[in-house]
Amino acid sequence: MAIILRPERAARFSFWRMFVALVISNLLWTPLFVLTASWLGQEMIAMVEHYEKAALFIVVVTVVVVLTAIHIIQPLCTWRGRRLWRSRWRRLTSWEFWPAPAVQWRLVPWLWSLGRRSGGFLVFTCANPDFPSGGFIGAAKSIWLRALVDAQAALPRWTLLPAAPAASFVTADSRAATLDAWMTEAGVTWPVVLKRDIGGQGRGVQICHSHPEALRYFVDNLCAVVAQEYVAGLEFAVWFAREPGVRTGRILAVSEAQFPAVTGDGKHSLDRLILSDDCALSRGSIFITKFAARIADIPAAGEVITLSDLAQPSDGAYAFDVTAELSTPELTDAINNLARHLSDFHFGKFQVRCPSREDFRVGQNLRVLGVAGVKAAGSAIRDPRRSVHDACAQTQRQWEACFAIGAALHQRGVKAAHWKTVLRGWFQARFGG
């Protein structure tokens, strides 16, 4: 009979009290365990000999029953286990947590037909002729940031730290020192955003609040890294399209990032607060892993802990579709002004931060965190208030616009990307460039 004690409670036990408890538990548990194993062992051997042909089936069933009891039934006996299972169930049944292929598989036949009608399955990569593969998979973030160099007022200060191969003399310490030197020269203070120059889906993106955090980041990321000044405020994504030969484009969709947070009460641990919060529960496993070092801490009453600071599902954030509410003529003009800084840019997505929704609505004080090219056509707003049908309809409209623009430019002589280039870009984005 095992005695499980919390560390803070065990510390209050005296030596002799703990000694007696352990002796009694072993005196009770050991004979019971040995007798049970002996009896069941003999019975199991007899059953296997008698039902030799069914021996494999019996073993498999026994293993399944034991694993079920350990991983399902036992956790359901505690409040924490039940909440974690409820979190898993939500992630399994709510479409916003599903991988993109699981959401958009129904569009594959339609995309195949659209590609054939448009003159090629990769013709959409012609939509942004001056950018590699139109900004499809594997496009470097630094290329877009350099193209926006004339829009200094809208662009946070940034720099590119070249890749450091494993065999190179360039170490994590020297890269962190280079980052410190740039911060001093540019007048940038912590925190700083570090992100892989080639990547996607939030991979390799981290907000570092100190030199040691940046050092650990460089240990894990040897590829080229973009270091960017941190910008506070609300975060929005704007999908944009402009037909060839037309000076002004249009906004296809707008999303507003939502960052879950919990408020301490001075009584319960961070783990309890996360699992008690209805919004945070759906992403409980993400937050418990992220805050593993302080999961047992008890936040002070009124202390607000922001659980996600990156507008990425992998970090626990989600988004609301605010197209009808915030897509105004003033915002359209502001996005068009940004797009004009990008040479021959026709389709993509702007990731921006802004002090307030009112500023965003009128297109003021926009700070561009990044730009995505034609790969934005395949992304949808994962708004939990919407149905999966609505998300697919949004993606379908974006692909239609992107293919139409690409086909028009292809007829004017722009060449589509090659499959080898796309596959190489996917490999770089997936594994860090």
Image (tube, helix red, strand yellow):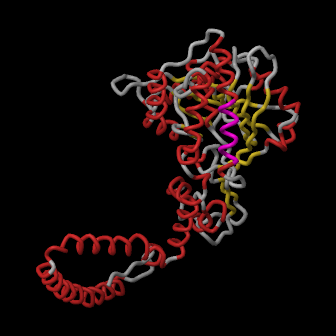
Q: Quadrant of residue 365?
A: top right
Tell me, yes or no, whether the highlighted magenta stretch contains residue 132: no
Q: Quadrant of residue 16?
A: bottom left
Magenta range is: 390-400
Tell me, yes or no, whether the highlighted magenta stretch contains residue 397: yes
Q: Main secondary structure of the magenta part?
A: helix
Q: Is residue 349 above or below residue 390?
A: above
Residue 178, horizontal then vertical, whole percent = 52, 24
Residue 309, horizontal then vertical, whole percent = 64, 46
- Horizontally, residue 258 falls left or right of residue 125, namely right
Q: Residue at x 76, y 26 (%)?
A: 154
User: Farthest left residue?
Assistant: 49
- Horizontally, residue 169 falls left or right of residue 114, namely left
Q: Is residue 132 above or below residue 266?
A: above
Residue 201, horizontal then vertical, whole percent = 56, 39
| Residue 356 visible | yes
Q: Is residue 41 above or below residue 308?
A: below
Q: Residue at x 56, y 47 (%)?
A: 314
User: Farthest top residue?
Assistant: 413
